[in-house]
Structure formats: C-alpha cells, structure tokens
Image: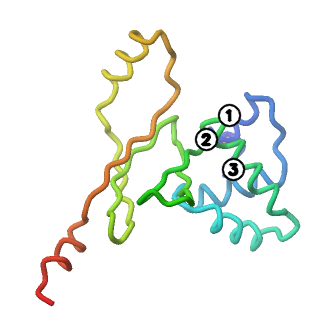
Amino acid sequence: MTADSPHIQRLKQAGYRLTQARLTVLEVLESEHGHITSAAVLGKVEGINPAIGRASVFRTLDLFTQLGIIRPTYIDTSLTPTYVLMHGGHHHHVICTVCKRFYEFDDCGLEALTRNLEETLDMRISGHLLEFYGLCAACQKRSAAPA
C-alpha cells in the first residue's frame, strides 16, 4: 500500500486522518483483494497489530463503507457480509452459490445505464457493485456426478 493509493487519497479528500487502525484495515483489505468477512479482518488486524481494538476495526469498516471504499455483499442472505474493495468506485463479480468462490470481471457494460440514470434521476453516480450468482463448472460437475 502506497501513499498514492486511491483509497488513501479518498480518506484524505474526505478529511480523515490516516490512523494506524485505518491503515492496517486497508492493508488487510488490499492484501485479500477485498473479499473478506469482518471476522477475518479482525483476525488479520490482530495478527498485524494486537493493540488495534475490535471497536476500531468495526468503526473503520463502517467509515470505509460510508466513503465507498468497500461495500458489503451478502451471499445466501447471510447476516455476515463479505466486504468487497471498490476499485475506482465499482466492482463486478460472479459468486458460486455452492463453493462461494468469487470470479471477478472488469467490463460490466453499464456505462450507458449509468449515464441514463444520472440524466433521468439528475444524480451523479459515484460507483456500483454488480453481483451475479450461479454454479461454477466444478460444482456443476459434482452435482451431475452419480452418487
């Protein structure tokens, strides 16, 4: 993680200090490519710096969500979100509903829809999260195999 990281720049632009807790949580999110539960964030932060408390981690996750740095995603309507790092204000993936593996992709094809929504709703859209759910090839093979 570098000082010119877009996520660090986002914190600075919003007027927030770069505290050790914020930098450590961001380091964990970036090292996991942004697909991580709060419990996993807590465990990894504790491994890096045990002085950072649970409340600081959760406050940081809330702040990052408010700033659009991360977004919570709920697989199978789980009450525990998996946090997704928003690169450039957007993120796209397909999730296997059986093994929970994430498949990321870059081009979502939503540029025209975004422009249309901005114009129609008189809004400036700052980001989006696109999720598809399905059954990956490996899980399809396992479900098709005779018992």
* Quadrant where the C terminus is found in the figure: bottom left
Indicate whether 110 appears above or below 62.
above
Indicate whether 101 appears above or below 25.
below
Q: Position of residue 7 (x, y in %)?
A: 65, 41
Nearest to the observer: residue 14 or residue 144: 144
Indicate whether 112 appears above or below 144.
above
Q: Which mark is residue 69?
A: 2
Neighbours of disc 2 within 10 Å: few (<14), some (14-19), many (20+): many
| Mark 1 or mark 3, whichever is nearer to me | 3
Q: Earlier in the sequence, mark 1 or mark 3?
A: 1
Element at label 2: loop
Neighbours of disc 3 within 10 Å: few (<14), some (14-19), many (20+): many
Nearest to the observer: residue 141 or residue 48: 141
Q: Amino acid at mark 1?
A: Arg
Cα separation between marks 2 and 1: 8 Å
Q: Which mark is residue 10?
A: 1
Q: Earlier in the sequence, mark 2 or mark 1?
A: 1
Q: Which residue is mark 3?
A: 61
Q: Earlier in the sequence, mark 3 or mark 2?
A: 3
* Residue located at (61% from left, 41% from top): 69
Q: Which mark is residue 81?
A: none
Q: Position of residue 115 (x, y in %)?
A: 37, 17
Q: Position of residue 127 (x, y in %)?
A: 49, 31
Q: Is residue 56 left or right of residue 126?
A: right
Mark 1 and mark 2 in contact (Cβ < 8 Å)? Answer: yes
Q: Position of residue 27 (x, y in %)?
A: 68, 57
* Residue located at (25% from left, 64% from top): 135
Cα separation between marks 1 and 3: 14 Å
Q: Amino acid at mark 3?
A: Leu
Q: Amino acid at mark 2?
A: Ile
Nearest to the observer: residue 22 or residue 94: 94
Q: Is residue 19 left or right of residue 99?
A: right
